[in-house]
Amino acid sequence: MGDDEGTRARGVGGRCRSILRAASDALTRCETRLNEVNEKYTFELCPEYRLKVNKTIGTTRVGMTFDARERRYRVAVKRAGSMKGEDESEREDDVPLFWRAMNKLVLDPEEKRIELYSRRVDYGPLSLRGVGEYNATDGEWGLRWQLQTFQKEKKRLRSAEYELNDRVRGCLRWDVQSVAPEVEGAVGSKEKFSFDVDVGSYHVTVPRLEMKVDL
């Protein structure tokens, strides 16, 4: 009788240890998955803060951008865009000859550098423009050209603007990179049932916050 009770006790103890080991393994796998999710699902908020001030004078638009992190600013002078509901051909007659050939003039006071960009010339699938540059520090100047195809994809940040009043807007620049989760399994006459889970990824970054002021 005592031997039977001891056998039953050892059997119960063995089953308990098996259950505890299974629970421990399940908790370990769960912790591994949670750590994987924590690494692959991220939100990064470390933006640059920029102030943009613009003034439109006739067919010319002057803009100043101040980067609060680097504490530097630059000035861009470009042709103002056409107004909504305005005929483009009629407006083209009022555009000075300079802006018919040039796209923008960029001044960097910190580096004492000036760059003048021409308008793009399109030919078939190609697009060409020239850039003139002058460095006031050493008095050197130069010309360079940029050739690209229309198929070139530019990585653009997503944006959302909030109008604070008629002249001031707040702008949030952000980006998302995502991969959908995936589950893969297998079963067969000579295989045990198995499956694997890829939790995917989701990364959100907010690299820039802007305030735009129209004078």
Image (cartoon, rainbow, N blue to C red):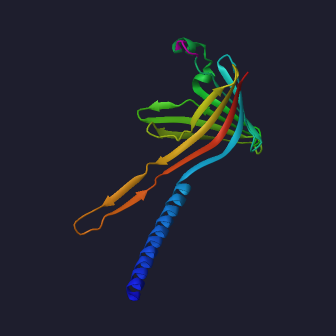
Residue at image point 27% right, 68% down:
191
Image quadrant holding the C terminus, namely: top right
Query: Does residue 46 lie above or below 14 as drawn?
Result: above
Residue 118 position in % (x across, y down): 59, 31
Query: Does residue 38 lie above or below 168 as drawn?
Result: below
| Residue 101 falls in image quadrant | top right
Residue 130 position in % (x across, y down): 57, 36
Residue at image point 53% right, 54% down:
40
The total number of labels drawn is 0
Q: Magenta stretch mostly in which secondary structure?
A: loop
The part of the chain drawn in magenta is 83-87
Residue 102 position in % (x across, y down): 60, 28
Image quadrant holding the N terminus, namely: bottom left
Seen from the viewer's position, the closer of residues 185 and 3 is 3
Query: Does residue 27 lie above or below 18 as drawn?
Result: above
Residue at image point 54% right, 12% down:
85
Query: Does residue 207 lie above or below 129 as drawn?
Result: below
Residue at image point 45% right, 78% down:
13
| Residue 117 falls in image quadrant | top right
Q: Hey, which residue is sitting farthest left in the picture?
A: 189
86 magenta-colored: yes
